[in-house]
Amino acid sequence: MDRNGCVGRRLDGTSVAGAFGLAGVRRNRRVPGRRWTRGAVAATLAAALVLGACGGGGAGGGEGGQLSGTITIDGSSTVYPITQAVAEEFMAEHPGVNVTVGVSGTGGGFQKFTRGEIEISNASRPIEADEQAAAEEAGIEYTELQVALDGIAVVVNPQNDWVDHLTVEELKRIWEPNSTVRTWRDVRPEWPDEPIRLYGPGTDSGTFDYFTEAVVGKEGASRTDYTASEDDNQLVTGVANDKYALGYFGFAYYVENRDKLRAVPIDGGRGPVEPTEETIASGSYTPLSRPLFIYVNNEAYRTRPEVRAFVDYYLEVVGELAPEVGYIPLPDEVLAEQVAKLEALR
């Protein structure tokens, strides 16, 4: 219980840590057969809506070295499953600390971060110039930490038996502003003369930013007549229920729903490549492989023991937890660089 009397409560009144029975989970001493699936993590989205009475940003430390306080995190829905998994295990280790993780998209997270409303921002793209300027104006110094690798999966309904692959140029024609593509036949003449119904992230999503820059050639450049959502699970449902749908979102959402979806191999100039852990890690799944980040408020890290402990713990366990929620761990040398950044802050 933190000093405000909160223990990370869900809206149904149960404790966040207790929702998955994590009391005995520790690094290298994990529950047999337990895996952090997308569905399990998605079930804890309600945990982000912690009762307002819990407050946020309380200084921690506690007596006798016991950590206490509240850590508030928001941002990317793509990074959410990793951060939520780390938060659950950290709270099991440190029950006096309440870690809340919200999902407002990378852009939404940076808005809160640069206003000083949160200590950590999840991001599926690097911080942009205007966001850097906002942080500087507010006097907020921060550290960027890579935490995992991800790919963007382009998916269709399993009943789609005509798409064997798509080129980046075809993706551009489909998704660019003022696109004239309305049917599958508009993409290739031998494909069905049926409407192509599109699903993708909203404009606050880092996945949207990355995809539009990598595919269309300009960040934020996209047609607008598609079903958009910051909740990737809604996009999964849309494609899974529509034979003529096409969508894109983070690779891990595809992994968790591969029984409902089919990933489309993408030809980035060297032949079609299917998104897999191996192709994403090697960079051969181009141009839709990317790093994932958290951004840490430097002052909070230096002055609040619970924030420092959480961020240090994050880098300690992320290599183990990332594959369990469908992401690819950083190479050892890259992870070591992130640890060195934290050491420089102390």
Image (cartoon, rainbow, N blue to C red):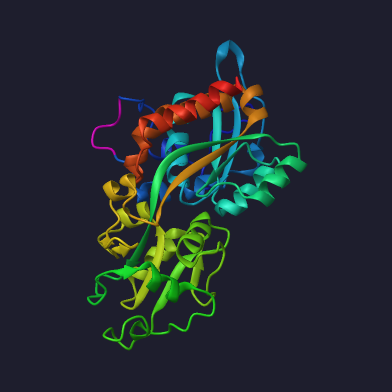
The picture quadrant where one finds residue 158 is: bottom left
Residue 15, visible in the rendered structure: no
Q: Is-magenta flag for residue 33?
A: yes
For residue 193, above or below residue 90: below
Numbered range of the magenta stretch: 29-34
The answer to which of 75 and 183 lies nearer the viewer is 183
For residue 320, above or below residue 50: above
Q: What is the x, y in percent for residue 88?
A: 44, 35
Relative placement, left or right, of 137 versus 74 is right
Relative placement, left or right, of 160 versus 340 is left
- Residue depicted at x 43% and y 82%: 181
Q: What is the x, y in percent for residue 119?
A: 62, 36
- Specify the quadrant that holds the C terminus: top right
For residue 181, above or below residue 164: below
- Residue depicted at x 68% and y 42%: 117
The answer to which of 95 and 334 lies nearer the viewer is 334
Task: Report the predominant secondary structure element of the magenta stretch.
Answer: loop
Q: What is the x, y in percent for residue 116?
A: 70, 40
Name of the residue lying farthest toward the bottom? 193
Relative placement, left or right, of 30 versus 12 is left
Name of the residue lying farthest toward the front? 269
Q: What is the x, y in percent for residue 261?
A: 29, 64
The answer to which of 282 and 260 lies nearer the viewer is 282
Residue 162, visible in the rendered structure: yes
Q: Is-magenta flag for residue 322?
A: no
Name of the residue lying farthest toward the top? 64
For residue 96, above or below residue 42: above
Q: How many marks?
A: 0
The answer to which of 300 and 220 lies nearer the viewer is 220
- Specify the quadrant that holds the N terminus: top right
Relative placement, left or right, of 266 versus 250 is left
